[in-house]
Structure formats: structure tokens, C-alpha cells
């Protein structure tokens, strides 16, 4: 097996994307121009949300979402242990603490059964979380109807971490429509579904949250005449009314995102085709293929397999030696040294740890050719 190196993920940038970015570079506004609101509207429209607020990363978006919901010292935020560390760190930025809800062994998403138990226990002890951050891991929508009902019953707010799930849907409703959540967060890092280089976006249907997000994104400053405390103070006048940050996205980035967004359906369809090739090619092998619920449309950001009968390290190294840069998503967050130092221990979330022991992410990105998929399957077969 030879050939070129195959990464696990890669962006797709077209000549149209480049032209869209160059148009902004030649225009009057590199930041705070007209492209950013156009991008926000386009993403919000695509996922059927009322508001879209773009920021410089999904990490900032998660941080702002927690702040907008009033998360602070003394509060607790729950999320899945099988996620990127940013989902958990968001709570810590606000001075709150983090706890985890174990995953469902079939979907690898936050388990509604574990959530129900943990909520009942927390309610008895008066230690309910302020927010649950549900992650659509790999792009497969989490069980939001159940998670939403459980959280609402206990007055707990819900944020969906949809960093993997732009273009995903549940029973025909796009992820990001916020049917069961207060806010949804997307990422536009180059490995994700569409890219702005770095970037993120929050959707919400709540006007109050959208206003808070706008303030948090830009220093807590407003120029809206209706919101100012002083009337007719002059054209230069603005007020800082709360403490915000500079989490803004540039028009340069928004132009790339807006151009990429035109290909969203095409991207998800290609990811679905690649997944179908993997599904068929791995049939009959001692490999657990990723579950996709009927009624869900996964964005298939990742195609994760589990290798219960093999030493994952050997398979990982063998594929890398053959030029196939497979990866592992994720090391359970509670096992990171920083979280261990905060009191978490191996054994705390056994399904997440079992998952981590044998999971492997195969290459998955729209430009991955059928031949490359065949090469991955053949190399993997040879190693099993
Ligand atoms: C990528 C990712 C993030 C962070 O996104 P950035 O845009 O890189 O800050 C958060 N959560 C999950 C699940 C991710 O995969």
C-alpha cells in the first residue's frame, strides 16, 4: 500500500471561496462590514433559527452561551465526557464547576437514561446544574426530545454543542433550530463541516439571549439609540453597559463561510456516500460501525469505528505507517490531567472510558475520493 498521505479531515476551498474572500479584501470593510450579517442570516436561515450571532470560535460561542444564561461562581454545568475539552471549559471560564453525564453505549452521545438518574439525584441534593450542554458527537443528533423534556422538568437550561453537526437534522428539523434548546453552537474550524478559518456561531430563538450575545461579543458596547441612557448625545456616542469581550468574526472570515455554506447539502451528501462505502466495506469484520438513528440525518463530521477485538494502538500505528492519518476522538475530558486535578477519577464514567479504549476515527471529508476510501478499507482489513 502506497500513495499519498490521507488525513483524517481536510477543508475544501474552491476558487469561488477565494474570490469571495478577495472581494472583501478589496472592499472598504475587512471587519464590521456587510458580509458578517449576511453570513449570520444565511446560517440562521439554513437551520431555521430566529437569530445567528457569529464569533471568532465555537469556544468563544460556548463561553458566551454560558454567560448569557447567567452561569457564574457556585453554578454547575453538565456535559458529555466524550467531547472536545472546550464544551466543559466554557463553564470554568465563568467561574462555575463542571460535571459529566455518561454516554449511551450505542449512540456515544450523552445518555438520557444517565441524565434522568443524575437529575433526580441532584434535585434531591439541591445541586441541579444551571445548564446542560448536549454534544452532537460525530454529527449524529443527540436525543434532544428526551434531554429537553428532562431538563425542562427541572428548570435546567440547554445548550447544544453542534460543532460537528451543521447540516444535521432530527425528524426533518435542522440541528440549530432550537426546538428543545436555548442556544446552539457551531464551529467553523477547518476540520468541521464548513470553515471560516477559525470561527463559530450561536443560534437562538430568544430575543433576550440574542441581545446579550451581541453585547458579550463586542465589549458590552451599544450604539442603538433606543438602548442609550442619554438621548441625542451626538453621532460619535456609544455606551458600555455591561462587560463584554472582543469575540468578533471578521468580514474576511464571514465571506469564506458564506461561500462555503452554498455547498452545505453537497458536503453532507458526500459525507453520507463515504459513510455508506465504509459501512459496506467493513461489513462482516470485527468492527463496530457508527450507529445512525432512523429519523436522524447525521452530518457525519466523523466516521468512528470501535475495535473491540483488537489492540487499537496496533491498528492506529499500522494505518499511520500506511499513510492513513486516522485519529481518536476523544480522550474523555474527565481523564485529562487538569480535570483529574479537579477531583475526577478513572472509573467515574465507565461507558465513556470503554468507548475511548477502542474507538478510532477513519478519514472523513468531502474531497476524500472513493479510491482513498477503498484504500483505507483494504489497509484496515489487512491489519485486522
Ligand atoms: C471543535 C469543537 C469545539 C471548539 O470549536 P472551535 O471553533 O475550535 O473553538 C467545541 N466543541 C466540539 C465538540 C468541537 O468539536
Image (cartoon, grey):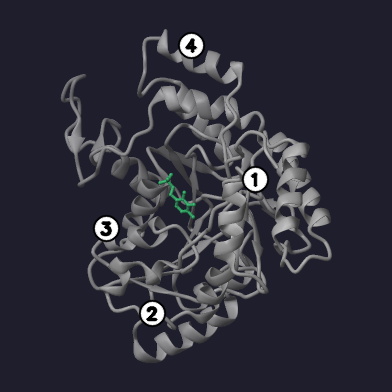
Is disc 3 in contact with disc 2, using a CB cutoff of under 8 Å?
no
* Residue 217 image point, x, y percent: 32, 40
Q: Which mark is residue 364?
A: 1
How far apart are the alpha carbons under marks 1 and 2? 38 Å
Answer above or below: position of 7 versus 355.
above
- N-terminal label among 1 and 2: 2
Q: Is residue 333 left or right of residue 44?
A: left
How far apart are the alpha carbons under marks 3 and 2? 19 Å
User: Regarding mark 3 in the picture, which secondary structure is present there?
Assistant: helix
User: Regarding mark 4 in the picture, which secondary structure is present there?
Assistant: helix
Q: Which mark is residue 128?
A: 2
Residue under numbered circle 4? 23
Q: Which mark is residue 93?
A: 3
Q: Residue at x 63, y 75 (%)?
A: 105
Closer to viewer: mark 4 or mark 2: 4
Compare residues 190 and 381 and report the one nearer the observer. Answer: 381
Q: Is mark 4 within 8 Å of ligand 1?
A: no
- N-terminal label among 3 and 1: 3
How far apart are the alpha carbons under marks 4 and 2? 50 Å
Amino acid at each position: 500500500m502506497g500513495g499519498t498521505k490521507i488525513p483524517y479531515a481536510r477543508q475544501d476551498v474552491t476558487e469561488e471561496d477565494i474570490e469571495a474572500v478577495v472581494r472583501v479584501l478589496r472592499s472598504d470593510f475587512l471587519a464590521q462590514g456587510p458580509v458578517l450579517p449576511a453570513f449570520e442570516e444565511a446560517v440562521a436561515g439554513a437551520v431555521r433559527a430566529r437569530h445567528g450571532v457569529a464569533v471568532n470560535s465555537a469556544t468563544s460561542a460556548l463561553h458566551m452561551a454560558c454567560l448569557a444564561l447567567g452561569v457564574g461562581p457556585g453554578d454547575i454545568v453538565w456535559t458529555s465526557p466524550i467531547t472536545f475539552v472546550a464544551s466543559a471549559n466554557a463553564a470554568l471560564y465563568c467561574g462555575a464547576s463542571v460535571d459529566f453525564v455518561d454516554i449511551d453505549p450505542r449512540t456515544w452521545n450523552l445518555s438520557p437514561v444517565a441524565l434522568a438518574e443524575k437529575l433526580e439525584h441532584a434535585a434531591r441534593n439541591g445541586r441541579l446544574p444551571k445548564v446542560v450542554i448536549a454534544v452532537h458527537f460525530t454529527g449524529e443528533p443527540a436525543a434532544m426530545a428526551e434531554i429537553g423534556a428532562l431538563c425542562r422538568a427541572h428548570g435546567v437550561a440547554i445548550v447544544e454543542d453542534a460543532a460537528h453537526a451543521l447540516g444535521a437534522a432530527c425528524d426533518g428539523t435542522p440541528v440549530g433550530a432550537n426546538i428543545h434548546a436555548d442556544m446552539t453552537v457551531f464551529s467553523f474550524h477547518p476540520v468541521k463541516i464548513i470553515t471560516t478559518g477559525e470561527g463559530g456561531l450561536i443560534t437562538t430563538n430568544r430575543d433576550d439571549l440574542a441581545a446579550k450575545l451581541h453585547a458579550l461579543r463586542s465589549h458590552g458596547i451599544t450604539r442603538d439609540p433606543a438602548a442609550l441612557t442619554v438621548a441625542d448625545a451626538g453621532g460619535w456616542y456609544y455606551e458600555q453597559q455591561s462587560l463584554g469581550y472582543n469575540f468578533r468574526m471578521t468580514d474576511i472570515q464571514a465571506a469564506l463561510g458564506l461561500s462555503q455554506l452554498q455547498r452545505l447539502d453537497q458536503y453532507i451528501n458526500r459525507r453520507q456516500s463515504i459513510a455508506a462505502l465504509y459501512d459496506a466495506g467493513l461489513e462482516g469484520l470485527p468492527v463496530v460501525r457508527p450507529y445512525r438513528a432512523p429519523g436522524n440525518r447525521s452530518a457525519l463530521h466523523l466516521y468512528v469505528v470501535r475495535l473491540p477485538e483488537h489492540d487499537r494502538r496496533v491498528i492506529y500505528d499500522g494505518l499511520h505507517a500506511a499513510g492513513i492519518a486516522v485519529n481518536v476522538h476523544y480522550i474523555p475530558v474527565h481523564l485529562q490531567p487538569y480535570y483529574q486535578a479537579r477531583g475526577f477519577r478513572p472509573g467515574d464514567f465507565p461507558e465513556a472510558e470503554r468507548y475511548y479504549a477502542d474507538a478510532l476515527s477513519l478519514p472523513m471529508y468531502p474531497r476524500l475520493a472513493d479510491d482513498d476510501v477503498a484504500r483505507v478499507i483494504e489497509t484496515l482489513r489487512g491489519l485486522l
